[in-house]
Image (tube, rainbow, N blue to C red):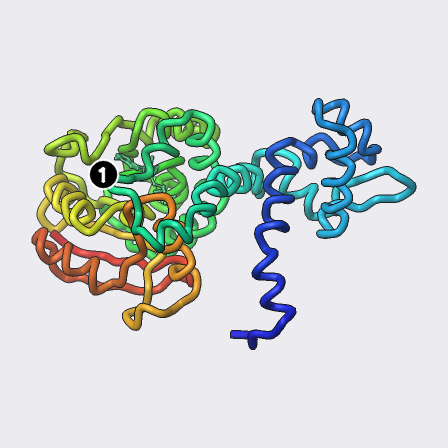
């Protein structure tokens, strides 16, 4: 960790200003509007129906951050900004950046939550029920999750896996990546209706409608998952951290029941090391869960307890990277 000094402290203290400039510009469509051209602030403000003075000041701030350049009063996207923030699609960060903007409000109540505890009965549903927020969230999961999905596809034994369920599968990036490695596997993505609308877009785009079936499943509102049984493999990727311990244990039990004997559950989580104070990504992510959900981040030991209680054996884990620990367990 770099040492704490005045420069680091002020950049942390003012970090929300930098962050909100990026988030607002992305939300308003300033990067998209500039695209590959150069324009005056007034032209951008007219096209996007913004207040001209305020747009000019924000665009100046974006030059200060290095996200835009400006020559003779004409603004343009910095080269890498054009790559990441002008359009949705391959390699884009447009949706995840919009998703971060939707989380911004939650973070404003951090001190209050730490004083009084989080409000009771909270889950990720507010974010999931709003169509626009849900779309940005789920497309954002594709943008930042496809890399890990490809890595996991290379690091997991998919031989003999004929039928796999991705529970809370979001944009279906794992079935999409796994389908390239094992041409025999048929997949079910079980998720909420709004999310499945987004998943459908990706499944179609990759030409996988025959291999990836999308099934509605609100996994806490049902006694059994209702997506069939005899699965060779089930995946729970980045799902548990949004829920409290009791619900995590419940979901793992329900997943156990859909597997055939010898079937495997794979968990992918942004997990803490057993010392509970490393590595940094799950420590910081836990605060994001604190302000928005009933969840947090877990250690492998905690997740293994739920697996054992559900009946799983042969539990093994490994860290794929700083944000991803894989746990495999057998029925
Ligand atoms: C953080 S995303 C993870 C998506 C994907 N598995 C990944 O690794 O990127 C959590 C997923 O769980 C789904 N989800 C959350 N609560 C749910 C519920 N009660 N029933 C079914 N799906 C739910 C969300 O719609 C979302 O797709």
Q: Secondary structure at mark 1?
A: strand
Seen in the image, is 221 located left or right of residue 28? left
Q: Position of residue 137 (x, y in %)?
A: 44, 37
Q: Position of residue 323 (x, y in %)?
A: 41, 58
Viewer-nearest residue: 221 or 187: 221
Classify the position of ligand 1 by quadrant: top left, top right, bottom left or bottom right: top left
Task: Name the residue rendered at 81%, 27% in the picture.
Answer: 43
Task: Name the residue rendered at 23%, 44% in the picture.
Answer: 234
Other residues around mark 1 within 10 Å, as few (<14) / some (14–19) / many (≥20)? some
Q: Judge whether 276 appears above or below 50 on screen.
A: below
Viewer-nearest residue: 320 or 15: 15
Q: Judge whether 118 appears above or below 225 on screen.
A: below
Task: Name the residue rendered at 73%, 28% in the picture.
Answer: 51
Q: Position of residue 82 (x, y in %)?
A: 70, 41
Viewer-nearest residue: 57 or 224: 57
Seen in the image, is 302 located left or right of residue 7? left
Q: Is mark 1 within 8 Å of ligand 1?
A: no
Q: Residue furthest bottom?
A: 3
User: Which picture quadrant has residue 186?
Assistant: top left
Task: Name the residue rendered at 45%, 47% in the picture.
Answer: 107
Q: How many marks?
A: 1
Per the image, the residue denoted by label 1 is 163
Q: Position of residue 178 (x, y in %)?
A: 36, 44
Seen in the image, is 313 located left or right of residue 17? left
User: Which picture quadrant has residue 9?
Assistant: bottom right
């Amino acid at each position: 960790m770099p040492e704490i000094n005045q420069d680091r402290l002020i950049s942390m203290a003012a970090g929300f200003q930098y962050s909100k400039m990026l988030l607002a510009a992305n939300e308003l469509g300033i990067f998209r509007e500039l695209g590959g051209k150069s324009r005056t602030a007034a032209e951008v403000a007219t096209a996007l129906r913004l207040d001209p003075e305020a747009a000019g000041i924000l665009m100046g701030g974006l030059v200060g951050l290095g996200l835009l350049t400006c020559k003779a009063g004409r603004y343009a996207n910095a080269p890498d900004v054009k790559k990441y923030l002008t359009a949705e699609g391959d390699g884009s960060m447009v949706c995840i950046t919009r998703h971060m903007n939707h989380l911004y409000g939650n973070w404003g109540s951090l001190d209050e939550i730490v004083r009084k505890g989080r409000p009771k009965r909270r889950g990720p549903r507010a974010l999931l029920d709003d169509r626009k927020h849900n779309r940005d969230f789920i497309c954002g999961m594709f943008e930042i999750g496809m890399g890990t999905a490809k890595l996991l596809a290379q690091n997991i034994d998919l031989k003999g896996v004929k039928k796999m369920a991705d529970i809370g599968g979001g944009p279906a990036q794992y079935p999409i990546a796994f389908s390239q490695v094992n041409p025999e596997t048929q997949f079910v993505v079980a998720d909420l209706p709004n999310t499945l609308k987004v998943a459908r877009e990706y499944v179609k785009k990759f030409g996988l409608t025959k291999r990836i079936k999308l099934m509605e499943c609100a996994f806490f509102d049902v006694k059994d998952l209702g997506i069939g049984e005899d699965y060779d493999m089930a995946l729970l990727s980045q799902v548990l951290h949004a829920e409290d311990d009791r619900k995590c244990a419940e979901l793992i039990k329900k997943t156990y029941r859909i597997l055939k004997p010898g079937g495997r559950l794979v968990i992918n989580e942004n997990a803490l090391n057993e010392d509970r104070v490393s590595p940094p990504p799950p420590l910081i992510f836990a605060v994001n869960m604190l302000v928005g959900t009933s969840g947090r981040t877990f250690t492998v030991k905690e997740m293994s307890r739920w697996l054992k209680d559900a009946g799983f054996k042969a539990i093994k884990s490994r860290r794929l990277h700083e944000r991803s620990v894989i746990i495999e367990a057998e029925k």
